[in-house]
Amino acid sequence: MLKTLRLAALMSVITLSPFGLAAAQADGLNVVASFSIIGDFARNVGGDRVNITTIVGPDGDAHVYEPSPADATAMAKAHVVLVNGLHFEGFLQRLVEASGTKATVVELTKGITPLEFKPEFAEEDEGHETAEAGAEHDPGNIDPHAFQSIANAKIYVANIADAFCAADAAGCDSYKANAAAYAGKLDALEKHVKDAVAAIPPEKRTIITSHDAFGYFEHEYGLVFRAPEGISTEAEPSAADVAKLIDQVREEKAAAVFVENITNQRLIEQIASETGLKIGGTLYSDALSPADGPASTYIDLMKHNIATIKGAILGS
Amino acid sequence: MTNPCLVFHDVTLGYNRHPAVHHLSGTVEAGSLTAVVGANGSGKSTLMKGIIGVLKPMDGEIVNAGQASIAYLPQQSELDRTFPARVIDLVSLGLWPRRGLLGRIRPEDREALTKALSAVGLEDFEKRPIDTLSGGQLQRALFARVLAQDAELILLDEPFNAIDAKTVVDLVALIKRWHGENRTVMVVVHDLNLVREHFPETLLLARQPVAWGNTAEALKPENLLRARRFDEAWREDAPWCEPEDNHADADGHGHHGHSHEHDGHRHSGTHAA
Amino acid sequence: MYELLIAPFVDYGFMQRALAGCLMLSLSGCPVGVFLMLRRMSLTGDAMAHAILPGAAAGFLLYGLQIIPMTIGGLVAGVIVAMAAGIVSQLTIQKEDASMAAFYLISLAVGVLIVSVRGSSVDLMHVLFGTVLALNDEALSLIAIIAAITLVLLGIFWRALVAECMDPLFLRSVSWLGTPVHFIFLGLVVLNLVGGFQALGTLLSVGLMMLPAAAARFWSARVGPMCLLAILIGFLSCVAGLLLSYHASLPSGPSIILSAGAIYGLSILFGTRGILNTRVRHHRHRTA
């Protein structure tokens, strides 16, 4: 029922929106970014010449996001639409069709080498996909979180610059210059991350986390991410679940645990104290934090994550 | 000479402004054995409740002259018969006045309890759960509790209700023993033959005290007739009781019969048959 | 056998704590449950568990999942409801069951209101389902203190409690303790429920309070032994439940309560005052 209502609202907005279409170049390039990290990249590349609308904002979950009529309007008015691709955005197909946008939809993962989910994380993501609309399943279990590798991020940035150039040739020089500058920052960031990892003793590089997003990070930088055994999001874990997780920590010699989806904070504390680990803190995997948070830009996000991980490992 | 145990000063006891006992004055002598008699609803149980303090008088006061310890056997026990207790547990409640909340139960206490149980003929019943007792046995156990309380003033409210004849005989013997031990005893009884046979004094109640004194005197036919005319029901339209209507007791003794000729004023119209 | 029964508790700290917390709760909660049952107030436990809610919810919303504010809030709410219900039933024609029902419903509604103003039903679930697997030092201390207070008060007021249950009119005729003891008892009920909800959540803590008591009824004919037996049954349920949760991967709280439930079922059938012993006809009888 609700879905029908939203679709109806969507359609009514869309039929009226063509009247709002402005001339592209005059007000700047209208860019729609599918989620906050891409939005951040786009801002860095586009500078003043672009008006960016981000669909899935900070702290949002692109897997389960339901677009609103405002999103459709933005989409319709856009000149360039930047998306992650690899089935990261569950809502995208419908939104593009519904909005009838004339903009180019650019998949920023073009050019990266996709990785598959590790088996233990694979089901997690599948759970996400089935959660919405039950539409496209990727039977190959490709991990879409390519942006967790900074090398890939640079490819994203390059793709963005190309897309902007194609849509707005006049600003191309500006875009390229911005992209180059930002790529430089990303290089520094990468060095920072690698140094941080190097500072962690090799035997302490295993982390248990329920986030399924760090496959590319692991591949690039050498930390090992494992899914927690037993504990799920249910309100009432069994003793067996807790014991399994404690065993896993001990056996795999995990050095930190990040399981924010356990709703019971005290349970995490109990597990942490029994295994001698420090409680992890928050990792940002799929979205930026709000502006006042510690991960409001991509660079901040990566810095925050590695600092948090390092702190948890070395602090315990 | 006279040794008052209880003194009633123009006592009115009742519920919700309706009196159940109306203007009772007089004295209960220490060591006396009094039967409290009257029709249903005539105020007997209410009087008992007033004496033990559960019910506060609407007017007047009741004085426990000698600060006597009181044992009370209610007409309808609030005893939970399904409570997991044995007879001995029930009877040992009677030790409360002496041992209180924390006092240790001493060997002499246990002896007293055993004696109390034999006095009522329940020697072998100590470990029996109370939900296995018959009506008579339970009543006797409650009597044993009263015994254990070793009180100076004993109030029994219809103790012979639904009791077999043999038990009645036994309990009457017990009451007489108390009388012999110079305890003050007041017993609500319905069986007038029993009263005439065993009780030296009688208080005949019909909301008002109709007669109070020597049993033969109190239970004269005229008195009984007057008591029978008592109107049991509460009347919402009954006139308010004015101070000049009651007769305060002039002398301190309780042995004069008080007959109040209020019949004409008190009842608004209908007389009880 | 060792692997099955002992090893889980030896190997894991959280199992030891869970056991400790649970055992202490049984120690104090089960006798309270026996008296509740004997006073025909068995459902009061459930009512009080709901009555506690607004206080605990308020504490949770103001301070998060912190033990102390939630406990204090729960205590305050519970005490208010218990006292109000008690006073009304003592002074008016209303009996205890109705007055308790009235006040706990009011309290529950207030609780839902508080939560709806800030928070969602998920937060309410946090309050409802504690987990015995996550008893930190604070929680254990709280449970220990509550157990100590309960046992001390039960010890001191034992006679009055029994007398008040058995024959309240008699007690009133010999002592003024009847009414205060009644309220002290209600206070103990609230205290133990509040302690219980830290470990098991409000609903399940009632289960640990009432089920062993109900089971003990089928075995004993005296209050004292009944209380001891209830404690023992509580202990057994805790151990069995935790082991069940460990070996069969079941949620801990319900496992404990179901273990108690199993013992209850067996008691109904096989207890000395159970069905088989009282209802089944025997072929021989004595002469006296």
Image (cartoon, coloured by chain):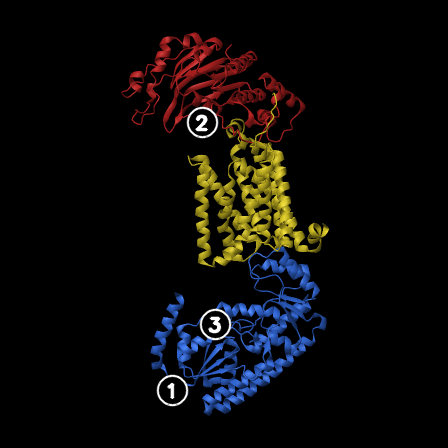
Chain colours: A blue, B red, C yellow
Taking B138 as reference, is A130 above or below it? below
Tell me the quadrant of the picture where the C terminus of chain B can be found.
top left
* Marks 3 and 2 on same chain: no
Q: Chain of mark 3?
A: A
Taking A254 as reference, is A19 above or below it? below
Most foreground residue, C176 or A274 = A274
- Label 2 residue SS: loop
Residue A7, x across and y down, in percent: 38, 71
Residue A123, x across and y down, in percent: 57, 68
Foreground mark, 1 or 2?
A: 1
What is the spatial separation of the Cα atoms under label 1 and label 3, in whole angstroms? Answer: 35 Å
* Marks 1 and 2 on same chain: no
Q: Amino acid at mark 1?
A: Ala
Q: Residue at x 56, y 88 (%)?
A: A180
In the picture of the structure, the residue carrying the numbered disc 2 is B55
Quarter-of-image position of residue A120? bottom right
Assess disc 2: are there few (<14), some (14-19) or many (≥20) residues with their C-alpha within 10 Å of its C-alpha.
some
Taking B42 as reference, is A313 above or below it? below
In the picture of the structure, the residue carrying the numbered disc 1 is A23
Task: Count all numbered tags in the image, as a single digit.
Answer: 3
Q: Residue at x 68, y 69 (%)?
A: A314
Question: Is residue B106 shown left or right of residue C184?
Answer: right
- Mark seen at residue A135: 3
Q: Amino acid at mark 2?
A: Leu
Q: Amino acid at mark 3?
A: Ala
